[in-house]
């Protein structure tokens, strides 16, 4: 099983969404799970993982599944001067070692070891990184995901699900 994760914030509350799916080409989730985490800290440049990690591990814990692959909204790796990316921290926080795929919508000067892909007719790229596989393979997986637009259907569902409880 695979998971697509996203987190949204309102003040010091984070809502993490986990879209569970079987195959990269799935157009519908097998399940959608959310977790609300109170007391999250503010965003700090270069330390994004401090805000996001507890939310991600909380929602993964609620699923009870050991995923073979987890897709996050962000980068897996940062350059040596900056430290490790969210995906690397997530992989270390788990009791097992899934492949972590990071899909970022914006370039980051401090990011490292990623590929740039375009989906559908969009000219705006996605920045794909990975731990546990080559970024080129992760890029192919993200390109193969369901949906005609820049953001794959299941990643869009994760994004929307995390936003909805905060309205």
Image (spheres, helix red, strand yellow):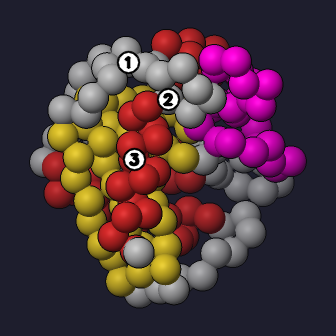
* Numbered tag placed on residue 68 in the rendering: none
Q: Which residue is mark 2?
A: 152
Q: Is residue 125 above or below residue 62?
A: above
Q: Nearer the viewer, residue 65 or 133?
A: 65
Query: Dot 1, crowdedness within 10 Å: few (<14), some or many (≥20)?
Result: some
**What is the total number of numbered labels drawn onto the structure image?**
3
The quadrant in which the N terminus is found is top left
Residue 117 lies in magenta, yes or no? yes
Report x, y in % for residue 115.
72, 23
Q: Which residue is mark 1?
A: 24
Can residue 147 be spotted in the picture? yes
Query: Dot 3, crowdedness within 10 Å: few (<14), some or many (≥20)?
Result: many
Furthest residue toward left: 64
Q: Quadrant of residue 4?
A: top left
Q: In the rendered view, does 12 fall on the left or right side of 56?
A: right
Q: Is residue 55 above or below residue 153?
A: below
The quadrant in which the C terminus is found is bottom left
Residue 90 lies in magenta, yes or no? no
Magenta segment range? Answer: 103-129
Q: Quadrant of residue 143?
A: top right
Report x, y in % for residue 96.
28, 40
Tell me how far mark 2 sits from mark 3, CA to CA. 10 Å
Q: Nearer the viewer, residue 77 or 28?
A: 28
Q: Which residue is mark 3?
A: 158
Report x, y in % for residue 126.
69, 32
């Amino acid at each position: 099983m695979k998971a697509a994760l996203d987190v949204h914030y309102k003040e010091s509350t984070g809502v993490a969404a986990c879209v569970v799916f079987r195959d990269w080409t799935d157009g519908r989730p097998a399940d959608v799970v959310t977790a609300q985490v109170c007391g999250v800290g503010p965003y700090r440049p270069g330390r994004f993982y401090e805000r996001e990690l507890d939310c991600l591990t909380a929602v993964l814990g609620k699923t009870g599944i050991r995923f073979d692959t987890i897709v996050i909204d962000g980068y897996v790796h940062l350059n040596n001067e900056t430290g490790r990316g969210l995906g690397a921290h997530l992989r270390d926080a788990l009791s097992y070692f899934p492949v972590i795929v990071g899909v970022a919508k914006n370039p980051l000067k401090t990011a490292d070891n990623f590929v740039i892909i375009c989906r559908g007719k969009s000219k705006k790229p996605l920045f794909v990184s990975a731990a546990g596989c080559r970024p080129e393979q992760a890029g192919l997986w993200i390109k193969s995901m369901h949906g005609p637009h820049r953001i794959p259907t299941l990643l869009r569902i994760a994004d929307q699900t995390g936003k909805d409880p905060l309205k």
